Image (cartoon, rainbow, N blue to C red):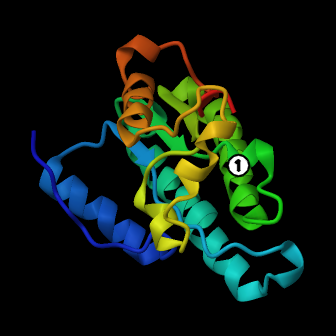
Amino acid sequence: GSALAVQADVSSESDVERLFETADRELGPLAALVNNAGIVVPKARVDAMDAERLRRVFSTNVVGAFLCAREAVRRLSTARGGKGGAIVNVSSAAARLGSAGEYVDYAASKGALDTLTLGLSREVAGEGIRVNAVRPGLIHTSIHRANGDPDRVSRLARTLPIRRGGEPEEVARAIVWLLGEEASYVTGALLDVSGGR
């Protein structure tokens, strides 16, 4: 296969438009979108959060996902001349757990992504587009290190029914399945990849 790296801030409408236009030009027609851009900021209780923190989290995690989904629908929809396709939003188990005392803002942003998944899936199902979400749990990624808590997954793994943290490849396999023909009758699903948590 071929790959193309395009620097873009998904919270910027003009960056998202440029990203998709570049992909169109360099890679050809869009077949699928994985909305995976997301941030988490240092732990805080809600009573310590300011508006700038909230804007930052929601701009990337929610506004960015909406903008990317919009551009994907414009290209994929059979009502607009597209061939159909699939969208997978990367949510989080935090959306149903709440992340009290740590990341309620992040959890709320992922709850919004779940709602986007449900609503958009129904909006575009008749236009050949399937929309689903995966909700990873404690996964060994750099997001924890970047947030100042590099041992979070290892520390909490013993609290999981499966007794270990997940690997990025395990989440990726779920995404690939949702994008593929094997999941051709699946839309509006929220698939937990969270070790039973």
Q: Is residue 135 above or below residue 27?
A: above
In the rendered image, residue 59, in percent from the top left (x then y), is placed at: 61, 72
Provide the residue designation for mark 1.
94
Residue 171 pos. (x, y %): 44, 35
Task: Decide: is 158 above or below 17.
Answer: above
Q: Could you say whether the residue bearing mark 1 is in a helix, strand or loop?
A: helix
For residue 59, above or below residue 71? below
**Residue 54 visible in image:** yes
Q: Is residue 72 left or right of residue 149?
A: left
Q: Nearer the viewer, residue 117 or 138?
A: 138
Residue 63 is left or right of residue 46, and the answer is: left
Q: Quadrant of residue 78?
A: top left
Of residue 132 and residue 70, the one placed in the foreground of this image is 132
Residue displayed at 51% across by 51% down:
69
Picture residue at 38% right of the left edge, 45% below the top = 75
For residue 158, what is the image quadrant?
Answer: top right
> Within 10 Å of the Cα at label 1, are there few (<14), some (14-19), or many (20+) other Cα atoms?
many
Using the rendered image of the protein, determine whether residue 137 is visible from the camera's viewpoint.
no
Q: How many marks?
A: 1
Residue most extreme to the right: 47
Q: Quadrant of the N terminus?
A: top left
Tell me: 126 left or right of 76: right
Q: Residue 63, how many percent across, how many down? A: 60, 65
View extreme (left): residue: 1
The amino acid type of the residue labelled 1 equals: Ala
Residue 4: percent from left, percent from top: 16, 57
Q: Residue at x 83, y 59 (%)?
A: 100
43, above or below 86, in the image: below
